[in-house]
Amino acid sequence: MGTEIKLKGDKVIEQIPSIKDKALRINLNENIYGTFAEIGAGQETVRHFFRSGGSSGTIAKAMSAYDKDFSDAVYGVESDGRYVTEERLKKMLTLEGQIIEERLSREKHPTKLFFSYANTVATIDFAKQFKGHGWVGIRYQIEPDEAYNEIILHIRFKETDARLQQETLGILGVNLIYGAFYKYNDPKRLLRYLYDHLDKDQLEIDTINFSGPRFADVDNRLVSLQLVKNGMTDAVMFNPEGKNILPASILYKKNLLALRGSFRPVTKVNMDMYEKSLKMFLEENKVEKDNTLVIFEITLSNLRSDGEIDERDFMDRAELLCSLGQTVMISNFQEYYKVVEYFANYTKARMGLAMGVNNLVDIFDEKYYRHLSGGILEAFGKLFYRDMKVFLYPMLDDNGVLMDSNNLKVHPRMKELYKFFKFNGKVVDIADYDPHNLEVFSREVLKMINQGKPGWEPMLPSGIAEIIKEHHLFGYHPQKELEQNT
């Protein structure tokens, strides 16, 4: 774990201190003082601080409440009986912080910056079926008289050996503590530093939240976007309130209906597709309304422009969808089968995809599957191998002809494959669509907004036009509108 050097071409752009050096710098700071509470994988983080030297001025206490009864006696009993949860981690961080405040006099230690670091994790099981996951966090001060800041994240292990997972957790813990004290003024960089001396094949971070006075201006949704952008996770999710949510907790054992789009902006077509496909989905066998979740998915592969991601533009789309009461997922999946594969990690219940005719035609384009050894057949095996069904919204072609599952045009080589899925009921038409929506196209609406042309408001769901105008989204400017009307 020596010093790493990051290069850009032949130029050294950054030297990354070793894990030992990071721990030692913390230890040699006479003001940083706190506790380590680690459950589930041993005392992997605090070990680095003990070994680096000078730890007596940093470590107030280190504990590992392995036994469940003892852990319950210290932190309380969880109502759901689970231990690897965010609620458990927060209890650990809060209690350990309170203990320091109670036992150390501020009069005697006026310059101390108190912290509590904690993790509660489950490493890989003996059968190697579940690779393990956990919650990791730190609650800490930057100034002695300042309120506490908090950084909490959820991780998934990718390694298949418990010892390696423990070592990975220890390195992550040191990176988090070091970043919290020395990189707090740039959360995006702090996020990248969490992977110092680690590889993305070792660890996935799928949720992170910053809170406290030093992070008052941090938008946790934008930080989540960085997780996907940096390849730290495949997807992040926001609930209708616009808050980060752990995908595993909301997707677990659910019936899922997904709609993919650019939603730039969300239109009446999108909402009609959602309402009509959901009605059909709920009529399917094995689909219960109370156990069904609808997800509006935006993929980063469609957000990139010149290799960059317009973060504000993304957040505008997500906020509009959340304002309509929807759950939003941002992913790095280009192909639909990867979306289904991702959902299949969390549920075996029935799934559905709602899409337009043009999207389905794209799915039958072989060029998207050249990287697979089994080509399009492999992709379709992954897409349709479960109880998965496509709900198809019709469209008008350039000649004004209505296109649906019966007359859409796929490549001649794909005709028989398409007929197979159509015959077996894997593709069904949304019949009771609103014909007025067939004239609505997001790209046209966007162009009208940009150019200040009138008449785009009725093409959007109720309330959306007002939000766009109020916040000047998607290039809207009242001056352009005024010029068009004069």
Image (cartoon, rainbow, N blue to C red):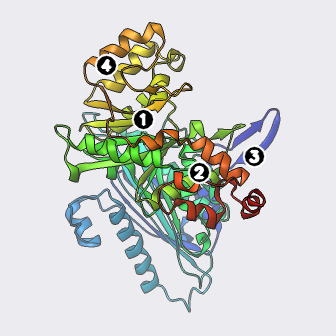
Task: Look at the image and tell me in which quarter the N terminus lies.
Answer: top right
The label on residue 421 is 4
Q: Nearer the viewer, mark 1 or mark 3?
A: 1
- Dot 1 alpha-carbon crowd within 10 angstroms: few under 14, some 14 to 19, many 20 or more: many
Q: Nearer the viewer, mark 1 or mark 2?
A: 1
In screen coordinates, is 485 left or right of 214? Answer: right
Dot 3 or dot 2, earlier in sequence: 3
Q: Nearer the viewer, residue 247 or 200?
A: 247
Mark 1: which amino acid?
Met
Q: Nearer the viewer, residue 1 or 159?
A: 159
The label on residue 355 is 1
Dot 3 or dot 4, earlier in sequence: 3
* Residue at (33, 59) in percent of width and height: 85
Mark 3: which amino acid?
Glu
Mark 2: which amino acid?
Phe
Dot 1 or dot 2, earlier in sequence: 2
Dot 2 or dot 4, earlier in sequence: 2
Mark 4: which amino acid?
Phe
Q: Which residue is mark 3?
A: 14
Provide residue 377's location: percent of width, then percent of height: 39, 14
